[in-house]
């Protein structure tokens, strides 16, 4: 039986769990996907998911209510609000903006702490992608920005995750902000560099915000510069068109040498890591074969 060593990189929002629980939950979901593949030779994924969220809790293993930096009652500073507005501006259509300008500010019902400009852009995005996910999107983008604007924290997070890579680690799976972290680890050759004896050959990204221009700009990637990995690393991206964090699109328009697959994670939580992990494209990327 084939055993594939996998490292998972989770996103923010995992403060109420642990490394043991994350690894168990991700492992069960991934096994379910692999077991559903009738044309793949028996495969077992040996998985580890480093719980890097703990690094944001000032040395504790969990974040308490007082540590919630992104709650609705916590106002955004000007730079933070500008980034979130830029994200929405990247994703909305001109006609959505025009429509939002004609609506009362109370229509969307967002927190009153938001500025009129951000509220209008949020309304425009809600019109394009209705479903009540605007506040979820704002929270997640605040989290993304926090990570990307804290270099010391980002380096600590990457180092912590890097310790989870053994020489035989063959696949890395990044979900949500975890896909940004995993991509950074690879593009900066902190893991999987050619000629180092590393077995790493595949990056799988799920529910990734890398398709949003504002996110790439904050990473120092200028507009028009394609995302790319070393030639020996295969990149598989999986997205649900109803996933708010992806902007409803994949990465094929902004990345080179990318294999992409669209999935349906259902209406309950299309951004769910576990739903992505049990999907056929992710299972195939781990077990082998075409996504």
Image (cartoon, rainbow, N blue to C red):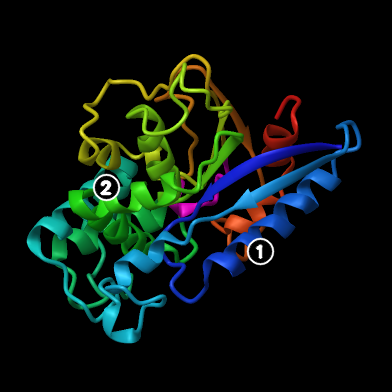
Left or right: residue 262 versus residue 244 is: right
- Of labels 1 and 2, earlier in sequence is 1
Residue 118 placed where, x, y %?
Answer: 20, 60
Which quadrant: the N terminus? top right
Percent x, y of residue 161: 43, 49
Residue 194 shows in this picture:
yes
The nearer-to-camera label among 1 and 2 is 2
Left-right relation of 223 to 93: left
**Which residue is the site of mark 2?**
155
- Magenta range is 238-246
- The residues tagged by marks 1 and 2 sit, at their Cα atoms, a distance apart of 26 Å
Q: Quadrant of residue 270?
A: bottom right
Give the residue displayed 50% in from the left and 17% down from the top.
257
Element marked by disc 2: helix
Badge 1 element: helix
Front residue of 262 and 126: 262
**Residue 80 at x, y percent in the picture:** 16, 58
User: Does the stretch in magenta take in 253?
Assistant: no
Disc assigned to residue 25: 1
């Amino acid at each position: 039986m084939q055993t594939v060593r996998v490292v998972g990189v989770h996103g923010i929002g995992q403060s109420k769990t642990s490394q043991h629980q994350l690894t168990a939950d991700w492992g069960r979901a991934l096994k379910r996907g692999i077991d559903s593949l009738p044309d793949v030779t028996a495969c077992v994924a040996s998985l580890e998911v480093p719980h890097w969220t703990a690094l944001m809790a000032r040395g504790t293993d969990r974040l308490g209510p007082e540590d919630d930096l992104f709650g609705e009652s916590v106002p955004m500073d000007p730079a933070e609000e500008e980034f979130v507005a830029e994200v929405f501006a990247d994703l909305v259509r001109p006609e959505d903006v025009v429509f939002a300008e004609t609506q009362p500010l109370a229509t969307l019902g967002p927190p009153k702490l938001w500025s009129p400009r951000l509220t209008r852009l949020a309304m425009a995005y809600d019109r394009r992608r209705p479903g009540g996910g605007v506040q979820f999107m704002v929270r997640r983008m605040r989290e993304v920005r926090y990570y990307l604007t804290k270099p010391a924290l980002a380096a600590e997070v990457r180092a912590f995750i890097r310790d989870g890579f053994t020489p035989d680690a063959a696949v890395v799976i990044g979900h949500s902000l975890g896909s940004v972290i995993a991509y950074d680890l690879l593009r900066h050759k902190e893991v999987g560099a050619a000629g180092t004896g590393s077995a790493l050959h595949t990056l799988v990204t799920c529910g990734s915000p890398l398709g949003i221009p504002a996110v790439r700009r904050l990473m120092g990637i200028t507009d028009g510069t394609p995302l790319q990995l070393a030639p020996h690393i295969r990149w598989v991206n999986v997205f649900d068109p109803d996933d708010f964090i992806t902007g409803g699109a994949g990465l094929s328009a902004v990345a080179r040498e990318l294999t992409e697959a669209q999935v349906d994670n259902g209406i309950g939580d299309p951004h769910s890591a576990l739903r992505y992990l049990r999907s056929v494209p992710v299972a195939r990327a781990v077990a082998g074969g075409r996504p």
